[in-house]
Image (spheres, rainbow, N blue to C red):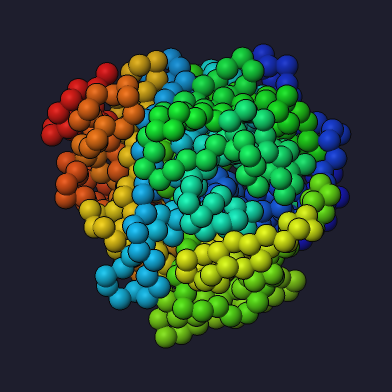
Amino acid sequence: MPSTRFRVLALAALLGTTVGLGGAVPVSGVSVGGVTPNPTNMLDCNGHSLTYRSVKVDLGGLCADPLAIWGGDAARFYDNGRYVGHDEPMVRFLSNAPGSANTLTYDMRLSTDPAGTPTVSTHLPITSDMAELVPAVWLGMALCDPQSYPLNPCIPDSNRNGSGTKDPLAAGSAFMELQFYPPGYPPFIDAPSCSAGRWCAALTIDSLEATYGFKFINPNCTEPVNFAFLQRNGVPAGPPSPQLADVASFTPNATTLMMNPGDQLQVSVTDSVGGLRTEVTDLTTGQSGWMTASAANGFMNTSALDCSGHPFTFHAEFSSAAPQNQVPWAAAEGSVMLANELGHFEPCSSLSHPFPFSVPYAGGQSFVDAAVSQTCVGGVEGARAGEGPCNAVTGACQSPTTEAGLACPFHNLVLTLVPCEFSDGLCMPRGPRPLVVNGAFQQVGWPIAGCQANTFQNGDLDFDGSAYLADWSNGSSLHPTSLQYIGPFSHGRGYPQVQFETDVGGSEALCDTHTGRGCTAGPIGAAFYPYWSVGRSTPAVGSSPPSGTCAFNFGGTIPTATVASFGGDAQYGRPDTVRYGGTLISSPRANPELSTPGCTAPVP
């Protein structure tokens, strides 16, 4: 692998030819200097930087899923030799109306978990929690970042930005996800939940440090992420920037907005003069939390040359959510999106291969979770032990598997040619366990032992975990209720069209992302694959849409609510081989929230 110095020099040589620097925006796509990164930071969301350590190494499942462009063709993305794609079923909202890509609102109801302890075995009936099924649900939007792929200027709130994956003049783009994290499995710094019983939310912004066509990509800060919880005073819990993120950044504090299961929310994403502002109002408790992605709040973009940070105020990239307006480096097609993260939990009878987790010297702070392991034993793995361990230094792994439980043809996680599950870690035991946070002892506990499959690869790539079992919302008291979503609305109007899509194909070993052959939803080996539906919102979610309005649900068919499920898994359409065959997407269709018979109340 070429040295970092060689790659930096290569970028400098390429600037005049592969990076378009023209246009009316006074911000160019390349700079040097700025805020020097701490040794431990979030300069690579996926945790594979050649130089830096990550504060939250398991954030990979919550990163934007990139694609790579080699020789004009899109392919799976490898971060320093490691495949980092993951499974995100989405609804893409389409509108040509001005403002539909920068000013929007949703009404939501959070899910509620069943009363019983989750089931460890796969024998029916199964009891499940939402955090087993999804580590996050998110609402997305494309943002301007001239320091992100393909390192071109960007005009905020404009349809004049090029955006195609094969457009050398496409604007530099970042992707915003307003993420909601279900309760039950804390602490968030190395697990999916903020607390044992309450939801939280965060504003995340992912960028990609590469030139057009990926002729250069910085191996030290490949996918930097800005991260900040929504706070009741709007002040970040810790530094949000990729360069300065620390333990506090990923630890909720006294002013973090915490929400109860079943709460009704109003959510807004608005491009204000001071930066992109995300706000959640909990209609049940009366509390609100917000975050503005501004330089004043500590947000930064990242120099592709040296990974330094530059205080930066993020704004929406596009004016409208037109079909051509999308982030050119993302596997997800679109700007305004609603999605679920899948494939990041495996229930276990016990654990093996200890793998203590620690974050040293992140901004002078520290975190230690010693009771962490790499391998799931029993549970969804059946009579055998699961994947791992992996040697973090050499990359050598034991018993890796891939789609349909097949043995992986590679036993080293670097530069494999197919997606493989190399290790189940990070894995946490059942019951209370001690933590050491900044030298002080704390205690957390999980209801069951489980693994997140998010450290040595990005997800459950043999598709045998909770997300791929029939554990989803279907009206049963053994499963969590579905989150309900009404919207988005922009300036009081709904979005005329939607597309259903999923990028799971890129994570399937049998999928040829060039031809689309073998790219399926659900994956081969998955016992179940969840899908989108609409149904009556009973009771109504939020206060602005009328009672009886259609709401989006995700999971299975809910007998008391589902009005239309669009063919179940068939809704995801076909591999988009014109753009990237790892993403399956339907043709545009009328927004079912606005047009489905049976949801009796009209919407705007």
Residue 576 seen in render: no
Quadrant for the N terminus, please. Answer: bottom right
Q: Residue at x 20, y 30 (%)?
A: 548
Q: Residue 523: horizontal and vertical position, in percent?
A: 36, 62
Tell me if residue 306 comes above or below residue 28 in the rendering. Answer: below
Quadrant for the C terminus, please. Answer: top left
Q: Residue at x 17, y 32 (%)?
A: 599
In the image, 47 versus 305, the foreground residue is 47
Q: Residue at x 21, y 50 (%)?
A: 558
Tell me if residue 62 comes above or below residue 498 in the rendering. Answer: below
In the image, 461 versus 516, the foreground residue is 461
Left or right side of 5 for 229: left
In the image, 390 versus 159, the foreground residue is 390
Left or right side of 494 for 169: right
Q: Residue at x 69, y 20 (%)?
A: 22
Q: Residue 471: horizontal and vertical position, in percent?
A: 32, 61
Residue 241 seen in render: yes
Label count reads 0
Tell me if residue 591 comes above or below residue 512 in the rendering. Answer: above
Q: Residue 484: horizontal and vertical position, in percent?
A: 32, 40
Q: Residue 45: horizontal and vertical position, in percent?
A: 65, 49
